[in-house]
Image (cartoon, rainbow, N blue to C red):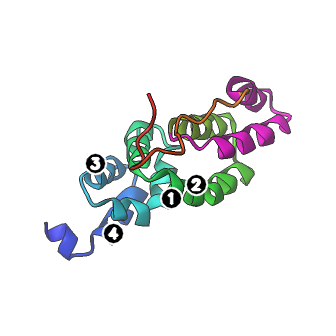
């Protein structure tokens, strides 16, 4: 509880920046108010791309409202994929995340971008994720629940 008094968001941000502290910080976020995850979403998204942190980070992202993700994810995804360091692993992990959280429009953008690559491994990601799967969420859905 002392962490919350001392500035939980700042402490968790520091933990998420440190490779050794990130797993602990992600677990703490899992038991914290969702607003903390939202406030640290840039770091949580980074963790979805990091070896050893993918599952924990994806579980946190899946708890977030799909409408909020629709707004929050595009700038982070584009920044990562537009980076000169973006590679096969980035495309694959981001495509997997987008599929898991039903961000199908953004997945379609990723596939289109992958199609322009000269890297055969990145083209493989486009092949794997095309055709784009239908969104599992329905218009009448409430509370971020997904159809089975």
Q: Are marks 4 and 1 in contact (CB under 8 Å)?
A: no
- Residue 119: where, in percent of width, then height? 81, 32
Q: Of residues 13 and 19, which is closer to you in this image?
A: 13
How crowded pointer 3 is (Cα within 10 Å; few <14, some 14-19, many 20+) is rated as some
Where disc 3 sits, the SS reads helix
Disc 4 versus disc 2: nearer the observer: 2
**Circles 1, 3 touching at the beta carbon (< 8 Å):** no
In the displayed structure image, the side of residue 55 where residue 132 appears, left or right: right
Q: Is residue 12 magenta?
A: no
Q: Which residue is mark 2?
A: 70
Residue found at x 86% / y 39%? 116
* Residue identifier under label 3: 27
Pointer 4 or 1: first along the chain: 4
First of labels 4, 2 by sequence position: 4
The magenta region covers 101-129
Q: Residue at x 46, y 48 (%)?
A: 47
What is the spatial separation of the Cα atoms under label 3 and label 4, in whole angstroms?
Answer: 14 Å
Q: Position of residue 15 (x, y in %)?
A: 34, 59
Q: Which residue is mark 1?
A: 68
């Amino acid at each position: 509880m002392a962490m919350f008094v001392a500035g939980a968001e700042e402490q968790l941000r520091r933990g998420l920046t440190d490779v050794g502290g990130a797993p602990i910080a992600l677990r703490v976020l899992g038991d914290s108010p969702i607003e903390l995850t939202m406030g640290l979403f840039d770091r949580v998204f980074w963790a979805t791309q990091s070896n050893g942190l993918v599952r924990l980070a994806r579980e946190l992202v899946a708890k977030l409202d799909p409408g909020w993700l629709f707004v929050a994810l595009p700038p982070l995804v584009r920044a990562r994929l537009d980076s000169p360091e973006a590679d096969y692993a980035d495309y694959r992990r981001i495509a997997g995340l987008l599929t898991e959280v039903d961000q199908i429009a953004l997945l379609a953008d990723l596939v289109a971008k992958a199609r322009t690559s000269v890297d055969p491994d990145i083209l493989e990601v486009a092949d794997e994720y095309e055709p784009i799967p239908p969104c599992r969420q329905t218009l009448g859905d409430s509370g971020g629940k997904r159809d089975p």
